[in-house]
Amino acid sequence: MDKKTQALVEQYSKSLVEVAVENDKVTQIQSEVASLLSIFETTELDNSLSSLAISHEEKVKLVRLLQESSSAYLNNFLEVILQNEREAYLLAILKSVQSGFVAATNQHDIYVRTAVALSDAQKNRILTLVAEKFAVKAGHLVETIDDSLIGGFVISVNNKVIDTSISSQLRQLKMNFK
């Protein structure tokens, strides 16, 4: 994506994020944007909206289908996209909106790798730990089972990492003996 297109995408996404924050609708619009992104992932909607072979009228019909299950805020936003004929950039704009919400709310996804599945109590302790250590609000907790860790866990949030895995400790011990 060239700089001009990137600036265009960022301007549209910034506008929706600002409207959501001003009207205290971040959670609602964030959820709706996530739903729209899942539609893009499971269909070829992006290809259709960016295709030169499909007429503008057909693209309008596709976006109107998205508006049927959206709030007034998102409907208005999608209407502006249609009026300015920016349908081809809708996926990029929605992804940028999602990133904008993370920045606006300081709510980051938490990635946890463990050797065994976490209990609910352990998940709550990790959420508390992340809030204290990283000073961020917890988004979604994404848990991955990784047998190579042997034990312990690795937490990644906003490009910061806590690694208490046994495999990491063994590597460190090996480095100390060299």
Image: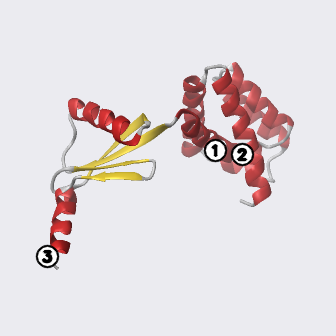
Residue at 81% from the left image edge and 32% from the top image edge: 80
| Up-down relation of residue 74 to residue 113 (above or below) | above
Residue at 79% from the left image edge and 39% from the top image edge: 58
Badge 1 marks a residue whose secondary structure is: helix
Can residue 88 be seen here? Answer: no
Badge 3 marks a residue whose secondary structure is: helix
Numbered label attached to residue 48: none
The mark closer to the camera, 2 or 3, is 3
The residue type indicated by label 2 comes to Glu
Badge 2 marks a residue whose secondary structure is: helix
Determine whether, in the image, residue 138 is placed left or right of residue 29.
left
Residue at 70% from the left image edge and 43% from the top image edge: 90
Label whose residue precedes the other's in the sequence (3 or 1): 1
| Up-down relation of residue 106 to residue 22 (above or below) | below
Can residue 31 be seen here? Answer: yes
Numbered label attached to residue 177: 3
Label 2: which residue?
10
| Up-down relation of residue 80 to residue 169 (above or below) | above
Farthest-out residue, bottom: 178
The residue type indicated by label 1 comes to Ser
Examine the image and state in which quarter residue 125 appears: top left
Dots 2, 1 in contact, CB < 8 A: yes
The residue type indicated by label 3 comes to Phe
Q: Position of residue 113 (x, y in %)?
A: 28, 50
Label 1: which residue?
96
Label 3 Cα neighbours within 10 Å, binned few <14 / some 14-19 / many ≥20: few
